[in-house]
Amino acid sequence: MEIERSLIQLILSVLFTSGLSVGIVLVLLNSYNKRKRLEEEHERVLREKELEMINAVVKAQEDERTQIARNLHDDVGATLSMTQQKLSEATQHFSKDTDAIQQILSIADMIEKSVTSLRSITNGMLPHYLLNFGLRKSIDRLFENAQKSIGKPCLVMEHLPAHITLTKEQEIQVYYIISELLNNTVKHAKPSYIDGEFQMMGAQVQFTIKHDGVAISQSDYEYLQLKNAGIGLSSIAHRIAVLKGSLNFERAERGGKILLVFSV
């Protein structure tokens, strides 16, 4: 009987210890899960605040670009145009055979070229074409400009359903991202052709740029970002964050591919 009683006490003691151990494990596990949830919530809040800050920075940049573009167009552009007109009027008081008239005509020609360049700059800073004609026609125009630079056709294909529409904010970000990517490709990759393509993959829009020039890989792109190599890459990164999209670079044996992906 004494042995049985001792055995029962031992079993109860083991059960109690086991139950206590399980209870402690459950408490620790619950505490760990709670702490993990708090950390995840904290990270989520930080990401949202970071995105808000990036949005604010990009918005401030857009406002500044718009203001500068308007000032250039309204003030500097108007002054140059008026100067050109005055010079043209002044030529009527000179004999067309004099050196003075040739000098004036030469200055008027330089002013006209300056006005043309100024229009190009302000259009790039404030995309009137995008606001007036939409994203697709604006992208076509960017590729037409690239075609003028490299001397060969640059095509854009589209395979998007008719019901897919982007917000004006998305259009602006996509436009500037593609514009910067095209400029970088023409300038640094030295391709003989560049093609673009819109297509739908599930709930995401993809825009692909393909070229046969000198390409970079994703690791190259990330390295350049870490090194803060150029304002353009920083601008692209900020706009990608605002768009909540991604950008991937692929290097092939000849040429490369750039893939922009974002949700609609």
Image: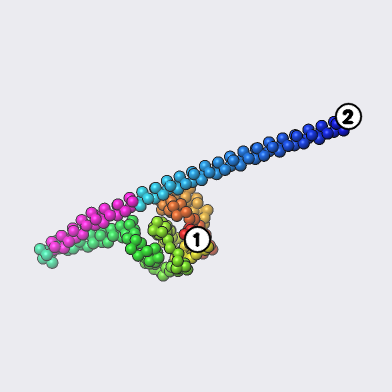
152 shown above or below 51: below
Q: Nearer the viewer, residue 188 or 175?
A: 175
Query: Residue at left 50%, top 60%?
Result: 204
Res 197 seen here: no
Image location of residue 197, percent across then percent down? 46, 66
Q: Is residue 13 magenta?
A: no
Query: Residue at left 47%, top 67%?
Result: 160
Foreground disc of the pair 2, 1: 2
Image disc number at residue 170:
none
Location of mark 2 (residue): 2
Looking at the image, is mark 2 or mark 1 earlier in the sequence? 2
Left or right, 86 with reference to 215: left
160 shown above or below 242: below
Image location of residue 237, percent across then percent down? 45, 52
Q: Is residue 86 magenta?
A: yes
Image location of residue 51, percent across then percent down? 45, 48
Crowd around label 1: few <14 · some 14–19 · many ≥20 (10 Å): few
Image disc number at residue 204:
1
Which residues, given as a range, are shown in magenta?
Answer: 63-91
Q: Main secondary structure of the magenta part?
A: helix
